[in-house]
Image (cartoon, helix red, strand yellow):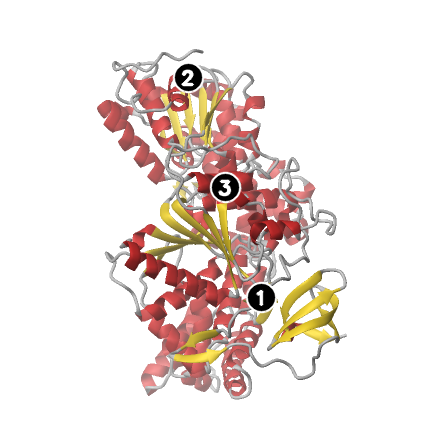
Amino acid sequence: MSLPAPSPDDPPYIRGLNEPQREAVLTTDGPVLVLAGAGTGKTAALTARLAHLLWTRRAYPSEILSVTFTNKAAREMRERVRGLVGDAVEGMPWLGTFHAIGAKMLRRHAELVGLQSNFTILDTDDQLRLLKQLIQANDLDEKRWPARQLGGLIDGWKNKGLTPDQLDAGEAEHFANGKGQSLYQQYQDRLRALNACDFGDLLLHMLTILRTHRDVLEQYQQRFRYIMVDEYQDTNSVQYLWLRLLAQERKNICCVGDDDQSIYSWRGAQVENILKFEKDFPGAKVIRLEQNYRSTPHILAAASAVIANNSGRLGKELWTEIDTGEKVRVIGVWDGPEEARRVGEEIESAQIREGKSLEAFAILVRAQHQTREFEDRFIAIGLPYRIVGGFRFYERAEIRDALAYLRLVHQPNDDLAFERIVNVPKRGLGDKAIAKIHQLARAEGIPLLTAGARILDTDELTPQARRALGNFVGDIARWRDMASQLPHAELARQLLDESGYTAMWQADRTAEAAGRLENLGELVRAMEEYDSLGAFLEHVSLVMDNDASADEPKVTIMTIHAAKGLEFDTVFLAGWEEGLFPSQRALDEGGLASLEEERRLAYVAITRARRLATILHAANRRIYGQWTSSIPSRFVGELPDAHIEAETTMTGGASLWRANWSENADPFANVGRGTGRGPGWQRAAAPSSSFTTAPKRVVESRGSAVSLGNKGRDDLSLGMRVFHQKFGYGEIVEIEGNKLEIKFETAGRKRVMDSFVSIG
């Protein structure tokens, strides 16, 4: 199809579009896949296409199915189209999210799946309550087989488009030794009895109806002359199957998405859906939007070089007419606290030097626990910040629970702490038992913990409740005794383990559980920086009280996942180290597929920046109380030298990092190398053994200067053979305070801290 040349008589929605955008708007018939790179104006093209279908009367508003992923995106599309074609958009009943449209359809055909049209949609709390009832009815131990885990499995099965009778033996084995399928069926039966469904049912039931009732399928196939889908790379199996059925008759389906920004596999999204679009719809037109209107050439070149190492992609090359701008900076720092200090200094300097608003800055992290260092630092220097897409570190539920335990150990009169954790995790203390403790406390004017201890000597509680309360009260007393003997961070570790709180989250199989455990580890690590438990709790109180006004400009701190779709002038990308980014947990669980998704996450992170992107990596991280040597992320090694400016305590920059990464030294070296572009990776190889001589390091610690690491171990000497857990055996060739240069037998020369080696 040849497009008409741009003309002054073009409708207003066409004017200003570039050639590929015009093609996406004017190619109305047949299947179309619009590959829209980051910042290429895909929303403008999508809304213009919708306006074009209405303006040219190719379809009535009620004959267009336009699907988005969020209510916000649906509202934005409706408002944009209204601005282009007026009130015609008001007649579009089929513009909305997958779930909203699924619910609208299902209410019309509810009886076909055993429901009435006025069915209730359960929220998560109601769903969990129902699952707990089923677990108890099947005589299962809810501690071993938690309802939340079963709920996550059922949600996953529904995302895959699987009804209970479609589960294979392998899927059913995932819960209660093969009872998963039976429980899923019981859950669905119970929902029907209640005339209810959950969110997963909204599409699963409609998929079942479309598959089993040909007349209903043909009705919708005839109704929808055109189908448009936004963010197609984020569709899961049931959404994909639903769309494919609806589009098979007319095949006028236009899907807009970016295979390089598919980062939600943990929510069921399958990048394969967009990759096989041409196979699903033979003869499909593929249009690439590659002109970027957001970022500088250096930023785009860096992002493109990283994502080119993925094999699972359709491919495109972003370009821009924006001036060159600054290169992407790669900064190596000593540790996490220095990373936070450096970012804070850079932001303050830009404020003073260039008069930039704090709204122009964003810090993007791979994992939520990384925000803690930045929050503490910004509180210390008075730099306003906001956490987007989550709570501030000390406001998160698991952190507040852990702090409540610590507060009650430190101050037994803290009734609010007692109330929060007396039955967390579940101990069998029901509302009646807790009410009796409150009653005694009020009657005698004593703290709840004291009342709990006194009521144990009565028959007010059931034997089970008395036993559970006795264990809790005894644990608090025991931990108070230990507080005078153990370092407070070690006390916190032991308390979280012995209380069952850590085990509670370890047993949780939801996507959030692993992050909560990481946050608890970060909390314990944060405690080590304070002299006592009391000092730490005082610090937390000050942090929680320091809340800047809502309308004051703030630095944005958020995860990369939460940043998708956003943009900022200046972006700091923190923690680009192996094991943190890419996430070791993701690699262990998903192998090559997870590595490619982590790389897509890196691409998303870099392309959030309009003018300046700064990537930081630390040589050391303190994880669960242990200092761990880190090496830069493999994604750092994939950055193009011509477009980056490296600043690090290690000489040589990215070229030397790449030179030290051997393809053949590690069996995992080639994972994710795609078509062969980009470096290999050696897990044990540190980027360089040539460190510049750094001056004595000093950090601020609550107003006083504390020297770091100048006194070394007395039992080490030059030429001594030592062992390092990561790098193996080696010989000490240089000693500088507590830092050693060691020539390792297999890993070469490395710079490490003396606390990490043992005499070999």
Which of label 2 and label 3 is nearer to you? 3
**Distance Cα–Cα, label 2 vs label 3:** 30 Å
Q: Quadrant of the N terminus?
A: top left
Q: Earlier in the sequence, mark 3 or mark 1?
A: 3
Question: Under tag 2, what secondary structure?
Answer: loop
From the viewer's perspective, is 44 left or right of 573?
Answer: left
Say how many tags the image has: 3
Which quarter of the image is occupied by the C terminus?
Answer: bottom right
From this view, report whether residue 444 is shown above or below residue 36: below
Say the numbered circle drawn on residue 503. 1
Q: Earlier in the sequence, mark 2 or mark 3?
A: 2
Residue 757 pos. (x, y %) = 68, 73
Mark number displayed over residue 341: none
Question: Is 710 placed above or below 372 here?
Answer: below
Mark 2: few, some, or many residues within 10 Å (few <14, many ≥20)?
A: some
Which of 140 and 755 lies nearest the eye of the viewer? 755
Quote the CA–CA distance across marks 1 and 2.
56 Å
Q: x, y (%) of residue 398?
A: 46, 65
C-alpha distance separating marks 3 and 1: 40 Å
The residue that label 3 is drawn on is 303
| Disc on res. 27 | 2
Decide if residue 63 is in sight here. yes
Residue 452 in sight? no
Please say if the residues under marks 1 and 2 sit with CB atoms less than 8 Å apart.
Answer: no
Q: Is 372 or 405 nearer to us in this picture?
A: 372
Which amino acid is tagged 1? Ala
Q: Secondary structure at mark 3?
A: helix
- Position in image of residue 568 (x %, y %): 36, 47
Q: For residue 609, what is the image quadrant?
A: top left
